[in-house]
Every structure is written in C-alpha cells, then in structure tokens.
Image (spheres, rainbow, N blue to C red):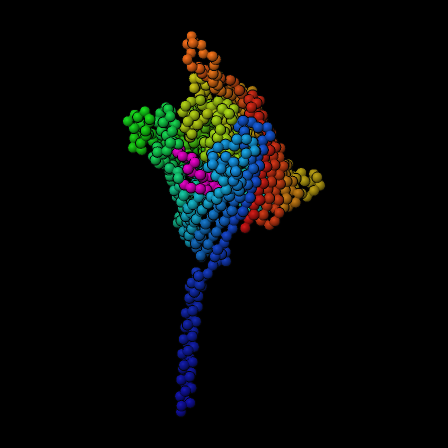
C-alpha cells in the first residue's frame, strides 16, 4: 500500500520540480541581457585599461658660437646649454563611460652653476665671450631648475551626452578663425625638427615634411591656441549641438610685471604655459554650434573677452612710463569679439569655412590723484570708454574637383580697428598687440587689422614629387603708419635662441641681450617718440623683436630726416604682394637606387609698396618700400629606413631705400679755465645725427643634419648650420656664426 502511494507522490514531486525548474530557466533566460549588462558594468571593455602611462624623455644640446661678432651678440658670442624634459601622460578608465587623465611635464635646465660673479649677481650680462651664465629657459637667470606643468581632466560620455573638463597649464583649443585660432606665420621644412614632434618613425617624419608635406592640420601647423585655466567641451548633445566654455588668464599679453610671470606662453610645444599664474586679468570664452546642418555643415556662435584687473595701477612696470614724464595717463583695453562661423562640405569636393566677427573694446584710464607732481594713481580715479564696433570677415574655400590640382582660396576683410587677441589676426608666436603697423608677407603668412585681400594656393599632385604655388595680394583699407616689420625666415629661430633675451614668452621683448641700446644692435629708426620708447606694449622704436620661435625686425620707412626730427610718421595706403613656389622631386630612380632621394626647393618674392604691384621683383620698383627674396634648397636622402640625412642651403635678403639711423653723441669741451673766462664749468654739447642707412641685408645658411631611429621608439636628431649676416650700409651689424643642436627623444 505504501509503495503504491509513494509512486504517485514521487511522480507528482518530480513533475512539480520539473515545472519549477522550467519556470526558473525561463526567468533566467528572460533576464540574460540584464545580467550581462550588470556583469559588464563591473568589467573593463575590450579597449579599456585600468591605468595607462605614456610619454617621453628628451635631452637637448644647443651650442651657439659667433666667430665674427656683431655688437648685438657681444654678450652671447658663445653659449652651450643642455636641457631635458620628462613628460608623462596618465590615463585611468574605471569603466567604458568615464576617462580620467593627467599630464605632467618636468623641464630641466642642466647647464649647472658656475663659480663667477653670476653666483651673487645673476641679472648681469656676461662680461666676456667665454664667461658662462647659469640660465637658459627664462629671464629669471635661474640655474638648474624644475618647473612643473600639470593638466588634469575627466571625460564622461553616453549615447546621448559626452563632455570633458580639463584644468591646468596646457589647454589646447580652437573655436573659430576670428575668436580662437592659430595661424602659421612661416613655412616649415624637414630641416626644422620641432621640439613638439609627436611619436613617429623618421621615415614617416620625412614623408610628412619633405615627400608629401602636411601643410594644414597636424602638430607642425597647429590651429589650436594654448591657455591655462579651466576648459569644458561638450562634444555630444541632443539635436546635434556642441558647446564649449573656458576661463583662463591672458598669457603673453601682460600689461604689468614681466618677471613675476615666468610662463613659457606662446611656445607651440610641451613647455607651453609652464609655471605660475599671476596675470592681472581673465579670459572668457564660449561657443555653441549645430552640427550636420543640411547634412554636412556646422554653424557656430562664438565669444572671446579679455578683462584686465585695475590692480595693474599698483605695478610700477605698468605705470612707470607715465610716472616718468610720458604724455597722457596709464590705460589698458579690455578686448571683446563675437562671431558667427560656418564650415563644411557644400559639395563632396568643395569645403568652405567662413567667419564673420565684430570686435570692440572697453578702455580704462587712470588719473593722477590730486594732480600730484609725483603722479600718484589710484584704482578709484578712473574713466571708462567703449569703442565703436569693428567688423572682420574671413572666408576659405578648398576645391578638389580637379584631382591633379587642389586649390585653396582665402579672402579677408578686417576693418581699421578690428582686433581679436587670440584669433588669426594676432598669432601668439609673435605678439603685436594692437598697433598700427604692416608686415612683409601680410595676408600670405600673417593677418592684421586694416587689411583686405586674397590668398591663392595651387598644389598639384603627381607621382614621385610635389609642387605648390602661392600668390597673395592684400591692401590696407585706410592709410596707416609706415611702420614695417619683416621676419627672419631663414635663420631667425637660431638668432633669437642664441640671445640672452630669448625667453620663449612675451614677444614685446626688444632683442638686445639686456644691454644698452647704443652698444648693441645698430637698428634703423622706428617711431622716435617718448610714448613708444617707454610703454612696452606699444613700442615701435625699431630693431629686433623676438617671438617664441621667431625673430622680426621693425623700422619706419622715413622719406627724409626732417620727418624724424619732427616726429612725423609717414602714412600711406600700402599693398603687400607675395609669390612663392615650393616643390620637390624624388630622383632616386635616376640614380638607379630604390632609396628616396628628394630634392626640395622653396623660393619667395615679397614686397610692400604704396601702389599696386602684381609681383615684387625688385627693390627698385616704383613706390616699393620694402622688398625681399627668400630661397632654400633642401635635399633629403633616406639612406636606410631608420636613418635619413637632410641638407640645408639657403639665402635671404631684404632691401629698402627708406631706412635711417639715429645716433646721439656727447662731446665735452674741456681745457684750462682762465680767470677771465666766462666759463666756470665744463660745457657739454650734445649732437644728434640723422643719416640715411638703407636696409640692405644678406643672409646665407649652409647646414647638414640627420634623423636616426637608433632603437624602437627612440631617436637622435642632429643639426649643424653655418650662417653669415651682411649689412651693406652698417657694417657693425655683420656677423658669422655656427649653430649646433641635437636632441634625443625616447618614447614610452
């Protein structure tokens, strides 16, 4: 009986268990996706890593030796420096939706300390040729030092939202050409191994620099600006919107103290913005944009504003010129600009970028408290004035309908007072601030206010070679002061780096090695007024001016000496013409070798004239104020995949009939004073000489270098260059020099 009863019970229990198990399996099956997601949320994705560290170590040796020394290099006749940089990039990814990172850079000056007068008088210039100085990187005259650059950020993303926030010393960003954009101010060649070159093999480096140059985009032609502060970029929002916002400080636009800043602002590399932040001011930026408009276009609205602190009046660096007799009162300008930009492919092979901006400024002027003869100024004794708005327009079109002839057209219109402190009109590599001046190659390589014109580039592509043709014509809208500037394109970087005055920041610096004006560079006369002699942001007194990696010279195209004596600056509506050809061809097959033997060349004619000149072919052309020719031949040979050799043969000259020299001399008439004489003291007599000294400079360069991947992710880059400079009218400026640079960079 019991057996008969147990059997049905067993069958019922088994059936019930089977039913329960089936339900559980069904339930588990139904929740498999949820379980999978829950499990994946605790794991790293296939592309994630919990912690990743990368970076590089670089060691650099620089030696400058002037065998024939001009007065401007008396304090810099010989210099050897060794510096190094350790950069670490650390990335933490706790899950697939968040990334945290930090960048650390430690630059070292390894030049060491020396037992000489500089131990307790570090701000003195060297007394003789071979005296060593314990500084390299900045004007603080420090010895071996460590400067830290920190940058931290977090990236949070999902399917409908993505944004990152970063803060620290180096924030690379761009918005629109007229608000936040960098413009390259000179051509780049394989000879120039940039300190910021990204990791690549030497064969790739030569491909991008010589065989098929990257002329837009990439680190060599960086369109980003760098700032120090806080930056937020919302790169994924509903409805195809993006946005960005930033608060920073006005690096390399300081109107006050220089030495208290200690920033490498403006350097396009790893030391950008290293150091402390004690600028008296703030930079605000905002942008909102709509992507995929009409399928391929982006429409954006932008704002950029620079606001200085009224505490500038407490700094003698700012108020000193006015306290010491300068006409007028201390003042500064808060610059603001708004713009609307559009970019994208209107056709599959036609890309368009356009930006229309409006700028204005709010000026603050300080007044003498109580009309004190000592000129005391107060933060509260001020007046404010807002300028009228000014318009700027930039249009760029790139057409590839003819595949063998890509064409680029750039057109600009910048009204007389248009000014954007971080836009294309003021490159940070050579700051000009807001001045009435005109540049050799204006429009082709550099923009500024009061300018309109067109820039054409034709770059046909063909097998085993390349060719580029550039032609530009730009004209001032209204007449302006004939203050002219030209860039030392062939040797300027080495000339500037070899100087005590080289700082990697603050381009207002007059490149005189810290010595008195009379004993250094015998410059052509600039604006000879008390105002420009004293106010550093407005100086136009002529001579050499250093940027970050550039050297410029300024002078006024005076028509006669009377204009100098009367402090009258000639004014014209000037034209700038520019014609350049750039090409190269691999002749390896001619030599029956499979090695790359690229013969590259570059030549440019440029001029500034008071009337239209289709081509600036000579300084003797009618109304030509300044003329220049620049030629460079650069052979590169890939001896081995890991070892390339580069040659360097260049010539550059500048000519102008409108240069003048101004010199002051004091002659003391002395002798035995007779009792009957009307003289009771010695009588000084001062004479000022004005003499015509046309600009007629010649520079040559002959160099050899190599790039060698001596191990995986490690390279050695060496350059030697012999240089001459000839001034046909002021022979004291002649010099000859040797420049040696070497860098080892190891990536990890």
Rendered view: 740 above or below 674: below
Q: Residue 221, percent across and down?
A: 52, 39
**Can residue 535 be seen here?**
yes
Q: Residue at x 43, y 17 (%)?
A: 566
Q: Residue furthest bottom?
A: 1
Q: Residue at x 32, y 30 (%)?
A: 377
Q: Residue at x 64, y 46 (%)?
A: 641
Rendered view: 572 above or below 86: above
Considering depth in this image, is 424 or 152 the residue closer to the camera? 152
Q: Quadrant of residue 170?
A: top left
Q: Residue furthest front?
A: 675
Considering depth in this image, is 330 or 659 the residue closer to the camera? 330
Q: Quadrant of residue 406?
A: top right
- The rendered magenta stretch, by its main secondary structure, is classed as loop
Q: Residue furthest right?
A: 592
Q: Quadrant of residue 498?
A: top right
**Can residue 265 be seen here?**
no
Specify whether 375 is left or right of 187: left
Q: Residue 624, percent across and down?
A: 52, 21
Q: Residue at x 30, y 25 (%)?
A: 371
The magenta region covers 254-277
Q: Magenta span has 385?
A: no
Q: Residue 616, percent across and down?
A: 55, 25
Specify whether 535 is left or right of 191: left
Q: Magenta span has 259?
A: yes
Q: Residue 40, percent across and down?
A: 45, 61
């Amino acid at each position: 009986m019991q057996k008969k009863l147990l059997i049905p019970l067993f069958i019922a229990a088994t059936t019930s268990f089977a039913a329960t198990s089936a339900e559980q399996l069904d339930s588990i099956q139904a929740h498999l996706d949820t379980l999978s997601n829950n499990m994946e949320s605790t794991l790293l994705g296939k592309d994630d890593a919990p912690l990743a560290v990368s970076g590089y170590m670089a060691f650099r040796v620089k030696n400058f030796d002037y065998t024939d020394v001009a007065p401007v290099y008396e304090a810099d006749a010989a210099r050897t420096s060794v510096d190094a940089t350790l950069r670490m990039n650390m990335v933490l990814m706790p899950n697939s939706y968040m990334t945290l990172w930090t960048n650390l850079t430690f630059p070292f000056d390894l030049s060491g300390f020396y037992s000489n007068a500089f131990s307790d008088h570090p701000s003195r210039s060297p007394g003789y040729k071979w005296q060593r100085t314990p500084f390299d990187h900045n004007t603080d005259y420090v010895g071996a030092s460590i400067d830290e650059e920190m940058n931290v950020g977090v990236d949070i993303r999902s399917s409908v939202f993505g944004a990152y926030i970063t803060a620290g010393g180096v924030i690379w960003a761009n918005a629109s050409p007229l608000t936040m954009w960098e413009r390259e101010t000179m051509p780049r060649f394989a000879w120039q191994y940039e300190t910021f070159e990204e990791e690549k093999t030497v064969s790739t480096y030569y491909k991008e620099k010589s065989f098929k140059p990257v002329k837009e985009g990439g680190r060599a032609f960086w369109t980003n600006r760098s700032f120090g502060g806080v930056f937020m970029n919302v790169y994924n929002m509903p409805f195809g919107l993006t946005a960005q916002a930033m608060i920073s400080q006005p690096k390399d636009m300081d109107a006050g103290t220089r030495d208290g800043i200690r920033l490498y602002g403006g350097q396009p590399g790893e030391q950008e913005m290293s150091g402390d932040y004690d600028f008296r001011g703030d930079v605000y930026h905002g942008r909102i944009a709509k992507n995929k408009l009409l399928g391929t276009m982006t429409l954006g609205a932008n704002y950029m504003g620079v606001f200085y602190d009224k505490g500038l009046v407490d700094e003698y660096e700012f108020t000193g010129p006015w306290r010491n007799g300068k006409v007028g009162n201390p003042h500064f300008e808060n610059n603001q600009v708004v713009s609307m930009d559009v970019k994208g492919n209107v056709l599959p092979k036609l890309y368009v970028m356009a930006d229309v901006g409006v700028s204005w400024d709010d000026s603050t002027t300080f007044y003498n408290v109580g009309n004190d003869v000592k000129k005391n100024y107060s933060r509260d004794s001020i007046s404010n004035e807002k300028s009228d708005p000014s318009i700027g327009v930039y249009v760029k079109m790139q057409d590839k309908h003819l595949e063998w002839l890509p064409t680029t057209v750039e057109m600009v219109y910048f009204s007389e007072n248009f000014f954007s402190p971080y836009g294309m009109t003021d490159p940070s590599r050579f700051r000009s601030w807001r001045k009435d001046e005109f540049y050799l190659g204006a429009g082709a390589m550099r923009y500024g206010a009061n300018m309109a014109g067109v820039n054409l580039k034709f770059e046909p592509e063909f097998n085993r070679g390349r060719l580029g043709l550039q032609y530009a014509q730009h004209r001032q809208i209204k007449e302006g002061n004939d203050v002219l500037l030209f860039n030392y394109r062939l040797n300027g970087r080495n000339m500037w780096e070899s100087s005590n005055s080289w700082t990697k920041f603050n381009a207002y610096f007059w490149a005189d090695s810290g010595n008195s004006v009379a004993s250094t560079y015998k410059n052509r006369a600039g604006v000879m007024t008390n105002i420009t002699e004293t106010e550093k942001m407005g100086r136009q007194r002529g001579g050499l001016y250093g940027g970050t990696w550039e050297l410029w010279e300024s002078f006024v195209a005076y028509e006669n000496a009377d204009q100098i004596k009367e402090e009258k600056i000639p004014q014209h509506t000037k034209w700038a013409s520019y014609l350049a050809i750039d090409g190269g061809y691999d002749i390896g097959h001619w030599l029956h070798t499979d090695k790359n033997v690229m013969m590259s060349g570059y030549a440019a004619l440029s001029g500034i004239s008071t009337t239209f000149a289709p081509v600036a072919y000579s300084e003797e052309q009618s109304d030509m104020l300044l003329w220049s020719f620049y030629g460079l031949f650069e052979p590169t040979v890939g001896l081995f995949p890991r070892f390339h050799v580069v040659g360097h043969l260049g010539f550059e000259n500048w000519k102008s009939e409108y240069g003048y020299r101004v010199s002051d001399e004091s002659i003391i008439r002395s002798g035995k004073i007779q009792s009957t004489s009307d003289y009771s003291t010695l009588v000084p007599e001062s004479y000022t000489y004005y003499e015509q000294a046309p600009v007629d400079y010649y520079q040559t360069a002959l160099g050899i270098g190599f790039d060698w991947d001596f191990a995986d992710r490690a390279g050695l880059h060496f350059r030697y260059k012999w240089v001459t400079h000839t001034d046909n009218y002021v022979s004291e400026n002649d010099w000859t020099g040797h420049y040696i640079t070497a860098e080892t960079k190891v990536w990890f």
